[in-house]
Image (cartoon, rainbow, N blue to C red):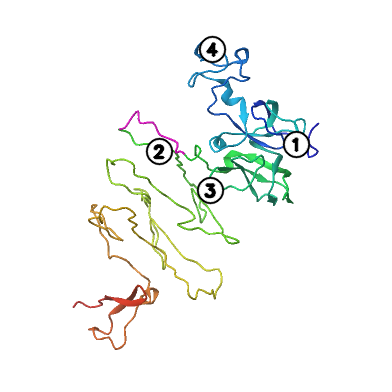
Amino acid sequence: MESSFGTSSDARRKRVYYTETSTIYEGMPVCYEFDATANVLGYDKAAGGDVVCQTSPETTAEGNQNEGKFIRVEDPDANNIQWFAGVVAGTSYAGMTGPRWLDIYIPNGAIVPVRTDLNCLVGQTILAVTTGQQELGVPLATDSRPIAVAEETIDRGTAGIVLARLSLDQFIYQDHGGSALSVDDADTSVSSLVNHANIEFLGSAPYSRVLYMIGELKGTSAALNGMFKFRTYVNCTPVSLVQVLCANLHIKSSGTLIYGSGEYNSSVYATIETESATPDLSGVNICAYQAALYLTESGGAPANVHVLGIPNGTPTNFDGLFRAQSAAALGGGTVSNSTVQDDAADIYIPVKFGDTVYYLRAYVTAQ
């Protein structure tokens, strides 16, 4: 008996062997036994791969092409969610228990019935496979992988069926149960890179972006330490300097830049914006750029620590350390009754240490 929802014509089924003893539900997520050494059914006449390398009638040693890795499936756990296989197809197996053969819908972009316990909005709610769960849920920070978007509006507070677009290419996920995927060290003399996008824009649209992401905080969400976070772990003695984030504005020989009134061409552009013309920002601390050094282990302070460093590249033809459109843009101006003011035209830029305001003095005329 099939689901009353029906299925998309581009849905693709696959027969797999479910190795768990749990109760089976329609739309239930399952994952491949990526580390399987047991043969498909656990005995030799169903074994695949290199029979000579079987360590027993029931197993095939790692590295010897055991077909159980793409035929055997199990409930999601902390190690296997990167190998999401699909969801149970139809109601034929609903209420039964494993182990047994069953059909699944594989994630190929088709809209199929899935099991979830979320309040779903059509075309918006992200559904994730989660450790220890037999339904799709919220994409949590650990032990969870987003794999679908709901295609119906319905509140499934109690786990049930919803139509969803099942596709892995909608999300970025590269993980192995919390362990980093590795780049082999067979060739240590050549630079390595994992993800590469090389795009040319030939049109004249006002905006051209290789990567565009928006994250919106609603409810009582937070983005502590950044909604978009880049972190480099140093677990060796590097062969060169370490730079976590590099941005280059590279002007080719045939390229030119234009003058923008009020703004500069730049390799990094950071703004703080308000949607309301009269936002209430009273009592709020804001800065467009923040730098800090956290030393959580003993060992002494570094020899040189600076918020801004200018490299010794050739040439370094800067017109100045920084530029603002006006002194008012920095909150600067003349300071009345200043005992250190030598010229009325000098600019005093306020800076704050703790709750005390100090001033950086910018000379307009040579002193």
Q: State how far apart marks 2 and 3 are (Cα).
A: 25 Å
Figure quadrant of residue 159: top right
Which residue is identified by label 1?
7
Structural distance between the alpha carbons of marks 4 and 3: 41 Å
Mark 4 and mark 3 in contact? Answer it, CB < 8 Å: no
The residue mark sitting in front, 1 or 3, is 3
Query: On the picture, is 148 further left or further right than 141?
Result: right
Q: Which mark is residue 141?
A: 3
Instruction: Label the magenta part by its dominant secondary structure.
Output: loop
Nearer to us: label 2 or label 4: 4
Sequence-wise, which precedes: disc 2 or disc 1? 1
Q: The residue under label 4 is which amino acid type?
A: Val
Q: Are marks 1 and 4 in contact (CB under 8 Å)?
A: no
Marks 1/3 in contact by CB < 8 Å: the verdict is no
Local secondary structure at mark 2: loop
Q: Earlier in the sequence, mark 1 or mark 4?
A: 1
User: Which residue is labeled 4 in the image?
Assistant: 51
As shown in the figure, which amino acid type bears the numbered disc 3? Ala
First in sequence: mark 2 vs mark 3: 3
Lower position in the chain sequence, tag 4 or tag 3: 4
Compute the Cα span from label 2 to label 4.
Answer: 37 Å
* Residue receiving disc 2: 193
Identity of the amino acid at label 2? Leu
User: In this view of the protein, which residue sits in the foreground, 43 or 200?
Assistant: 43
Specify which label sits upstream in the sequence, 1 or 3.
1
**Residue 12 is at least partly visible in this image:** no
The residue shown at (57%, 21%) is 38
